[in-house]
Image (cartoon, grey):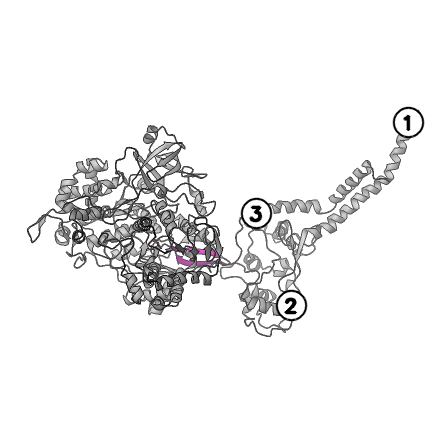
Amino acid sequence: MGLMHMKNPANSRKKPSKGGLFFFLAGLIPSLIIGWVIYPMVLYSKQAQPINFSHSIHMNPEIVDGIEGDTEIEKCLYCHEFREDGTFAGIPKLAKCTECHDDPDSALGESEEEKKFLSKYVANEKEIPWYSYYRQPDCVYFSHIAHVKMGEINCKTCHGDHGKTDKLPVYQANRLTGYSINIWGRNIAGYKTNTWDRMKMDDCAECHTLKEKEGNNACFVCHK
Amino acid sequence: MELNRRNFVKMLIGGAAGLQFTPLPWKLTDDIAIWTQNWSWLPVPQAGEFTLEKSVCTLCPGGCGIEVRKVDGRAVKIEGRTDYPVNPGGICPIGMGGLQLLYNKSIRFTGPMKRVGPRGSGIFKDISWEEASRMLTARISDLRKNGKPESVAAIDGNPGRSTMAMMVERFIKAIGSPNYIRIPSIEDTYRMSNIIMQGTEGPMAYDLENSDYVLSFGCGLLEGWGAPGRVFNAWGNWHEKSQKKNIRIVQVESRASNTASKADRWVAPRPGTEAALALGLAGVIIEKRLYDDEFINYNTFGFHDWKTADGTNHTGFKTMVLKNYSPAQTAEITGITPDRIISLAMDFIKAGAPIAIYGKGKGTLNGSLYECMAVQTLNALAGNINMPGGVIIHDPLPLNPLPAIKADAVTRRGLNRPRIDQAGSKRYPFSNSLVNNLTEAILKDSESPVDTLLVFSSNPAFTLPDHGRFEKALKKVPFIVSFSPFRDETANMADLILPDHTCLEKTNDIVWPTGLQYPMYGLARPVVEPVYDTRNMGDVIIGLAKRIGETTGASFPWESFEEVVKTRVMGLYNSGGGIVDYDGSAPAWKQQKQRGIIDQGYASFNDMWKKIKSGGMWYRPVHTYKNREGLFKTPTGKFEFFSTQVETAVYEYSKQVSRNKALKAFGIKEKGDMAFMPHYNPESAGKKETAYPLLMVPYEIINLCSNWIPGPPFLNKTLFDNELRGNDSFAEINPATASEYGLKENDRVIIKSQVGEIKVRISLFDGAMPGIVYVPSGFGHTAYDEFLKGKGVNPNDIIQAGKDPLSGQPVWWNTQVQLIKV
């Protein structure tokens, strides 16, 4: 009886330990899949921009000669301009588009996107409801002119090679926060390889520090 | 390998452990934190381009200059303009809060509507402008066809001199109805007083900034009287240390209002006895022979006793005042000691440039005509009429008149019918509108004499004293049309809504801000695109007239309201000399005093019009002082202490009835010559009623809308806890009166008059006169949204409105009440 007593617990210890690992993994692996694959898919909504605008066509002087500027940055600023008071206009308003595309009946091209642009927006004088990839929260004060003119930072440093793209990326908004995916970064773990991969507070601070502007890491500089 | 409890737990542990190696928990925590910052109800500022638009505020007849800050086309803030002569920089809280009147859908109408619920329910159905216009014009055309155009009546709250008011009046007359009825305001009292005493048609122009002794009879200088921004600025100037002169402000008012508390001297006569006080002061000045001899002897009529050609002896103002208003007699009436009366009179008359000004709070409602005249006699005695720092006499603004209306037989017949309110008739010869008479006329007959009532820029069902009777009258009117942009109490009674734009969306003019001392024309322009499907009332009127056609349409040859404004403004250009900009370096009141030469800022009419449209102003700060030749246009050509016009009016009316009956019909108690001079009427201080031993006096404050405009909900936050708490508003009473009734702070009471009762809480206030219950005006809406509806009570609910002698306008400041503790 005594032996039986001695063995029995050992038996019962061994048996479940084999199956235990299986069940442990049965919990572990799906949760890794959920966390790394499914969660990001569920978290972000996907919206196509109202019109597929091609930056590369507009930046190509052989196709479009209206965009003036000697340097790349000047060309960006031709449309994404600074207003008279120094504030940054961001995504251009329709009025900027119609500086060149002023005739709704013009044969701009054959593509559906161009037709949509002319018939839906230009003809009705309706603003295009662009999605903004880089809109920061309201509690963040950010001055473009300070970075571009004083800091001499290229657009690309923060926004990537957007100017060379032929298609606008699908806009993805965080369903909880409402912010664009570009703020947290496309990598769900928050890893980045390029300066433009992410736009969180740490990224601002990192650059400030790199450029020996630690003073600008003070809270009130951005959170006024 | 079975899934027992133990293995299930292991699976859970595995799952939990696995999650730690994914970004999920960390990102989720971060996102949840951000999520809490982005709830849909949290206000988020608009992003986009900042722009500033300049315009003029038209929420009251003050017309302060405003600057509207916009972000991406959305108006986000209203501020005072520093480049506007009336109010260099400041505006009142209502003007600032006005932004909410633009966007708030629960306050304003979003398009034309017709009533589907019972009257007063506010249940409407959206209709098109086409349908709305058709409904109204078909009705008017039918009335015209049936030969009854006079049964169309209008109630208009647009400031009297404005082009919009002119359009409404023209529309009603072009239909063929004489019944254009205006909402009473202090401007009526000024107008009648000026006509009777001076024979002048120009507006009341008080040169406050240049005065060194301002004796204010009831003007709520810090409560929003006149152009609030102007008065605040003047108040600041008066108290500048750099001012060499010792400027004194005296407030005559029974309650310690903000103005009274901040004045250099506060004089509190019993409410309704202000006329006696003014005459008492006049008595002291006369008795001590301190009046301006030259002015009195050469420019006035009726000061000394005189004998007419037929040998009748007449009592002059001097004798009348000395006999009836000695300091002792005045003290008896007003409750101010004889010493104080004498010292006040001496201070006033010995000041370098004294001015006595008249008002009642903000001036939203009318004042007492004889009282206003009594105050004006002080200015005459001081000889400050048409002098710097005094009361300046101007011609009306030289705007072009509109051409005469075209009239066919129907129109002519209609216009020859007597007015329903009897204003301008032999019985009310000086009034141009008597809305209280309209109410009574509608209630009197079994059938309403008004078939179609059009209501413009006013909310009489809220603002009129004893508006309950007015509402009762409204119920009898078969068809009511409201042009109000707001979902106000009167609009809720309407059958059809043709909503006007709100202040920031429309072209509208301010023709001479109330009380300003130099000619001034302000033009408000749209600073935002119309937010909803509303239309400028002026354009709507033109459209309606054209649709009615015939001579009504022909009377409106313009394409737009702006064209009408432009036509009128042409008159300013033709009159020569005017300024269309302001940089703050030379205040207009200083310029006018120094008799500067106008450096006209425009080359042609088109240039001027362009500048007025963008800058919003035209003004002419030059004036010829002292010259009194031909200044007074009374029958005697002089400033009349004894009004020959009133005497004639009584005489004319006494052709129908006896002289005594005529006087009685005019509401004048006095029988002799005194009837034609400013005098105190004991009834204006309330009748002695033992059952209702207290007097209720409504009062106005700067951050509460007591006129037809709904109070912007922002302003609720500025009210003190003893003004509004939850849904309770407060009545102020003196602690002595409170202890008589066993009342403590915050107690709930019923204030009961013979008309009705209201429930309030008690606020004990040493600045309240014993025996008086002070109730703020502007609370107690039964319309609008949660921020206005049911918040507090409206004193107008229980006002027992008497009739002001001579003018016939409502007396709203002396309702007898009792207090019942709840």
The residue under label 2 is A56
The residue under label 1 is A5
Nearest the eye: B434 or A70: B434
Q: Are marks 3 and 2 on the same chain?
A: yes
Q: Are marks 1 and 2 in contact (CB under 8 Å)?
A: no
Reply above or below: A7 against B59: above
CA separation in Å, label 3 and label 2? 38 Å
**Quadrant of the rendered structure where residue B478 is?**
bottom left
Report x, y in % for residue A181. Answer: 65, 54
Q: Are marks 1 and 2 on the same chain?
A: yes
Local SS, label 3:
loop
CA separation in Å, label 1 and label 3? 69 Å
* Label 1 vs label 2, nearer the camera: 1
Question: Where does the magenta region start and end?
Answer: B42-70
Mark 3 Cα shell of 10 Å, populated few (<14), some (14-19), many (≥20): few
Q: Chain of mark 1?
A: A
